[in-house]
Amino acid sequence: MGWLKQKPTMVVGIDVTHPGPGSVKGTPSIAAVVASCDSDYAQFPCSMDIQESKKEVSSCSLYLSIAY
């Protein structure tokens, strides 16, 4: 992974999890985003939010909620 340290780089991960079969109607989906904030890629602050059930695209406000 030496190529990651050649230039300043941020590693970002985003995922949305949805209620399973048999869940109560209207149960929200949960979206989360993590991003590296140090040069050793050891720290990944996280932000999570609930959103409309079964909505796959995460809210834009979630991406902006990580502060450095």
Image (cartoon, rainbow, N blue to C red):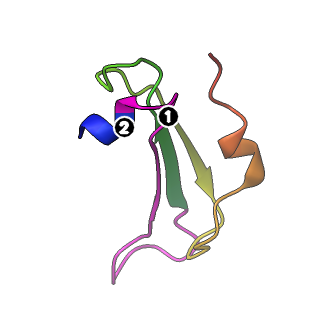
- Quick check: 46 above or below 14? above
Question: Dot 2 surroundings within 10 Å: few (below 14), some, or many (20 or more)?
Answer: few
Measuring from the top left, give residue 27's x and y in whole percent: 52, 66
* Residue drawn at (47%, 21%) of the image: 37
What is the chief secondary structure element of the magenta stretch? Answer: loop
Q: Are marks 2 and 1 in contact (CB under 8 Å)?
A: yes
Q: Position of residue 18 (x, y in %)?
A: 44, 69
Q: Position of residue 13 (x, y in %)?
A: 44, 49
Q: Which residue is mark 2?
A: 4
Give the residue type that dot 2 points to.
Leu
**In the rendering, which numbered label is found on residue 9?**
1
Depth check, front residue: 19 or 34: 34
Instruction: Locate residue 61 relative to residue 20 in the image: left or right.
Output: right
Locate residue 54 relative to residue 21 in the image: left or right: right
Residue 43 vertical position relative to residue 60 in the rendered view, above or below: above
Q: Quadrant of residue 3?
A: top left
- The image quadrant of residue 61 is top right
Asked whether 4 or 46 is in front, the reply is 4
Bin the neighbour count of mark 1 within 10 Å (Cα to Cα): few under 14, some 14-19, many 20 and up: some
Looking at the image, which residue is at 34% across and 76% down?
Answer: 20
Task: Tell me, yes or no, whether the highlighted magenta stretch contains residue 36.
Answer: no
User: What range of the chain is rendered magenta?
Assistant: 5-28
Q: Secondary structure at mark 1?
A: loop
Name the residue nearer the viewer: 5 or 43: 5
Q: Quadrant of the C terminus?
A: top right
Q: Residue furthest left?
A: 1
